[in-house]
Image (cartoon, helix red, strand yellow):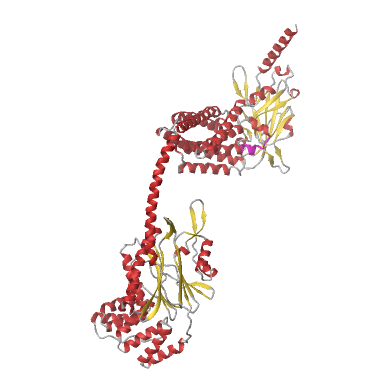
Amino acid sequence: MLKQRFLTSVLVFLFTSFAISAIEPVDLSELCSEKNCQGRIWNIKNEFHSDYIKSDFTPKEGWKEIRSFPIWLNQFYPSSESIANYTLLTHFDTPEKYFENETQMGIRMGEIGEVFTIYINGWKIASDGGISGEGIINFHRTIRGQVYHLPKKYLKPKDNLLVLHIIGDPRYDHTGLYLTRGYQIGYFDDLKYNSQDRTSLGLIAVYIAIGLYHFFLFLKRRRELHNLFFCGFAMGAGIYFFTRTNEIFELGLDSVITQKIELIILYLFVSCYYLFFSYLYFSSVNRYLKILFYFNASLAFITIFPPLYICEYILRLWQITAFFFVLPAVVYLLYKGVKTNASYSRNLLFGSIALILSAMFDILDSVVFNTGIAVSKYTFFIYMLGIATVLADKFTELHRQTEILNSTLEQKVVERTKELSKSLDSIKELKAQQDGDYFLTSLLLRPLGSNLSKNQDVKIEFLIQQKKKFQFKQWNSEIGGDLCVTHSVSLKNKNYTLFVNADAMGKSIQGAGGVLVLGSVFAAIVERTKMSTLTSNVYPERWLKNSFLELQKVFETFDGSMLVSLVLGLVDDSTGTVYYINAEHPSLVLYRDGIAEFLDQEMQLRKLGIRITEGNLSVRIFAMKPGDILISGSDGRDDLLIGTEGENKRIINEDETKFLQFVEKGDGNLSQIAEHIQKFGDLTDDLSLLRIEYCPENAISLDLRPMWKDAIALHKKKMFKESLQVCEEVGKYFPEETRALFLASLNKYHMGDWNDSADMAERVRLREPENLKVLLNLTFIHIKLKNWNRANVILNEARKLAPDHKRIHQLDRFLSKQGKPIAPEEHWN
């Protein structure tokens, strides 16, 4: 008996529940009869008054009548203000069956916002959102699918008045009732049950899980970037679809936040979609896809700041670009994947087409239909599982191949080890041969770079650190393109210390080749000077010029494939006067009284091996004082690695004045200078330093001025022989005095010694190649000696300096006629 009663109770409960659920809810957007359905009449007005909520209120003048959904209030009351009040009202009847039981009633709003209050028959049913005291919305609540309790005591069988008081931004489409359906009154539990999208929540959980799984796969194999972008695609889709569910409004967040998150995630996860395909098929991304990604990322960033009505325009812009640019890009990637027979490309193509069509429908629905149906979430689930299956098959295939490789790994390791051993032996043999060549070359270079100076008044030191270090058998050595060499030579019965600091183009063997050529030719020049009276019976300027031109002719034969920068110089052992030629080598540095400074202010000559004209060649002259130090160095002293920028870009020192600081900190000591150089940065080239110190035991101190005045006075009195003797005395103690040398040339001319006069004038020209007065007098002397060709060469140099000079025209006319010469120039400063 008890069992029968229990079964009867269950059947009654189930029947009652079914009967209750069978009652159709009241549709607030349509009014249907047995024959047809038509739009329910709604009245709206752009203001609110407490009289409007009274149960007997009837709208009159000033109200607008609407019979279709959605109700976007900005279409009926356009405004440029940021906030406005609206009233929406309609009448409905309550079916009598709702009053026959105690089941709780409810009202469901498909979508309503931004701040709203719901009244039925004058009773407040629900409200959401907030307004500050200044009349500004401080809490936005544009909600979808929310169900609110509706006490039955507020309802009447006939002619119930439903009033919606809405406050929002009139420029924003969602201010009002945005969707076409979903506005109902019925049983609360039924409405709540129907509004819950449990299927979507399940799918969202699957998307998040798939995304996390592929993120962990990416962490294991970071080179497979397609797993990272598929993770972004899957998780982004999960978050996006969650923002489209009704459940997100249960969190109580400001709807501005939720809607902006929805838009930002949309822009980014669609970007991950096409980047995934690009990396899956081609392991790279082309420039076009990168631009699309940056564009979408920019839209996502911009969406953070403006109000929602502006975000709507940004969304429309994105939808247009998605249709005209992103969609063709995806189609192209899928087509190219099929064309190149990429794995599973055909399956992914058909799945993508189905997804794209459903997405297009959802876009059109959001723009035109506004039904709120999200077809793509179902097709997306099928598509997502398809891609996950493809990636799983790919991973399984990779694992299978790995197992196959592992099964034969031992044999392959043995075979590969044998191949590597053979290759290593070959490399070692080649390396030994190369190091042997290096060692032989270093042996050849060793005698060419020696310090053979003998004078104690001129102390020479040098330091060389070649970039290329190597080991051959038990010997450690180095090889490179820098050279330092010194000798003691005699010119015109006067002792000089000869020095060279050179840097041949190229590193290791290439630079060493240049040094071999330079050192060998230079050694021959030095030996010839020591052995030949004719070669040594020249002044230092002429010797430097002849030696440089001889080296130049040798390197010109290499046609630019071998270039050398160098400083070639002579130091007068008795006076400390330095004569030198600088061919595109770093400037000499004078270290005097604790201060370092450059001697050369500008470059005069290009490297050895680059063709020059004779007029461009000049010999510089400098008088050292007791205790002075001259330091020459290759460009390795400046080309220092001082840092890195990024992965591959090196930062090289470009401040050549840093070397002056190193000289001062090192107090002119080469080892200390080198130490400071390498503390500042790493060497990137060969480094050579040559130090010349003038330290005479007995320094002679004379006053030049009275001697010079005597020489000029004697010359003006036509006492040329006496004037010459004074000039020679000046030249003995002050060789750097070019004025005395020029005056001596004129004295020699007047004494009839034209050859010596020309020789001295040529020395002056080498020191001052752009001295017009010297060029004119030298031209005249060569005319006197009937050296017509030489006279023409010198006159052409003068013509370049002053083409309109009267004296040049006179000499030019004489050379053309070979007539009687005019008197030489004799004006003194």
Magenta span includes 258:
yes
Q: Is residue 154 left or right of residue 453?
A: right
Residue beneath the point at 52% across and 44% down: 294
Q: Based on the displayed image, in which of its 4 quarters is residue 614 positioned? A: bottom left
Magenta span includes 578:
no
Residue beneath the point at 38% across and 83% down: 741
Residue beneath the point at 31% across and 79% down: 533
Can residue 324 be seen? no
126, above or below 711, in the image? above
Q: Quadrant of the N terminus?
A: top right
Q: Based on the displayed image, in which of its 4 quarters is residue 257 positioned? A: top right
Q: Based on the displayed image, in which of its 4 quarters is residue 826 positioned? A: bottom left
Farthest residue toward the front? Answer: 474
The one of 132 and 639 positioned closer to us in this rendering? 639
Number of numbered discs on residues: 0
Q: Is residue 147 left or right of residue 645?
A: right
Q: Main secondary structure of the magenta part?
A: helix
Q: Is residue 735 left or right of residue 818?
A: right
In the image, residue 638 lies at what x, y percent?
48, 63
The one of 377 and 659 positioned closer to us in this rendering? 659
In the image, residue 315 lies at what x, y percent?
55, 38
Q: Quadrant of the C terminus?
A: bottom left
The one of 155 and 551 positioned closer to us in this rendering? 551
In the image, residue 333 lies at what x, y percent?
44, 36
569, above or below 98, in the image? below
Farthest residue toward the top? Answer: 1
Q: Magenta stretch?
A: 252-259
In the image, residue 539 lies at what x, y percent?
35, 79
111, above or below 635, in the image? above
624, above or below 439, in the image? below
